[in-house]
Image: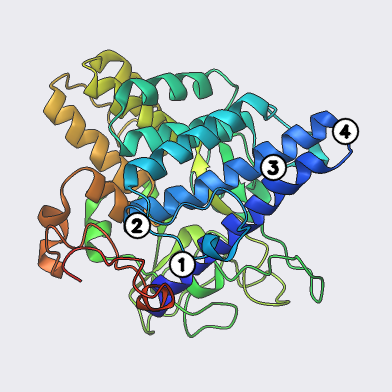
Amino acid sequence: EGQIEGFWTGQYQSINLCNQVIDNIPTITMDEALKSRYIAEAKFIRAYNYFRLVRAFGGVPLRLSLPKTSGDFNIPRASKEEVWLAIEKDLSDAAAALPPAYGPADIGRATRGAALALHAKVAMYQKKWSDVLNYTNQVMGMGYSLFNNYEALFRVPNENSSESIFEIQCKSLPNIPGASNSQYSQVQGVRGQSGGGWGFNVPTQVLANAFETGDPRKDATIIFRGETTPEGDFIQASGDNPMYNQKSYVPFSVPYRQNEGEDQNVRVIRYAEVLLMNAEAANELGNSPQALISLNKVRARARGGNINVLPDVVTVDQALLRKAIYHERQVELAMEFDRFFDVIRQGRGAEVFGSKGFKAGKHELMPIPANEIEKSAGILTQNSRY
């Protein structure tokens, strides 16, 4: 439960900071345009936090302002529908106020495209396919493009690329308050080698087998023991795990300061996912030609000019095309922390995870942390069958 409780606590800590901005900035005398932007940025982050909470736990306590009385601290769970509604309101407000882009000094801040793309994802989880199509179509007209080299996309020199819609900016600044000093890459790094990491969140053989023959994304996503990386690091053939996450990989030559990979950004939404959401929505609405265009753009980038692999998908059968889009999400977004939630929203939990002990009607949601229930004196209720 420690990790689940840590996840819960982290989201609410961020929500609290967002609420401080949203509640307090309106009273400050300052440039009105900047004031509007700061509030919109906070609403985007708050929406992202609640999106992560609602897909993990279902309905959760909905805190949209700072507590003002003692009774405001201990509130019951809102329904998942109420949480989704609050998320969509925040994202609509954010998209209306945020700029489409920033100058170099503000790279990494939430943009209108980020708000629209996250709104599309939120709509996708609710099967609001017309909204998904609308929001993704808008983002697709905003100048984003797929980065030409899939493997290099995840390396530090290519952060905030043409494909980046929103990524968490990570920077190591020793002894400087507010620096991220992120351990995202360290905990997933190659275990047991100098310059590696802790070896958590490892790929499975099921994932390795999911890639089509010759798909370059397999080698770009998974580090196998005994291989030499594009940066020239030899991964020892012996070790704790047979595979590691190459998307979070940090070359061993990168200077070590606080921890391995502390400067490596976390990609939250990429343009490739916008295309795949567009494809899924179009297919669900019966527009297979549009679905195929968006899906095949992702495959074309992945094949990297090699016409002998990853042929275009051509089926216009809705069920078969849906299956192809599900598969493409699995391999394109592998190791980017969407797979479990994707399978659940697709209604395939028992089919995909049954061999791991998945029980329908229970494991679609995580348990509410017991400490939170105890601190609430029972006002918070537990999810079913836990």
Pointers 4 and 3 in contact (C-beta within 8 Å): no
Label 2, label 1: how many angstroms apart (C-alpha)? 10 Å
Residue at the spot 57% in from the left edge and 66% down from the top edge: 70
Task: Determine whether the residue tagged by mark 4 lies in a helix, strand or loop.
Answer: loop
Whole-percent x, y for residue 6 in the image: 47, 72
Q: Can residue 129 be seen? A: yes
- Residue type marked 1: Phe
Q: Position of residue 271 (x, y in %)?
A: 50, 34
Q: Looking at the image, is 172 positioned above or below residue 137?
A: below
Residue identifier under label 3: 109
Quadrant where the image shows the N terminus: bottom left
Query: As shown in the figure, which amino acid type bears the numbered disc 4?
Result: Asp
- Is 240 in front, or is 117? 117
Residue designated by label 1: 7
Q: Position of residue 293 (x, y in %)?
A: 35, 19
Image disc number at residue 31: 4
Describe the element under mark 2 as helix, strand or loop: helix
Which residue matches tag 2? 56
The image quadrant of residue 124 is top left
Q: Is residue 76 toward the left or the right of residue 208 in the image?
A: right
Foreground residue among 174 and 379? 379
| Residue type, numbered disc 2 | Ala
Sequence-wise, which precedes: disc 3 or disc 2? 2
Q: Amino acid at mark 3?
A: Arg
Q: Mark 4 or mark 2, which is nearer the start of the sequence?
A: 4
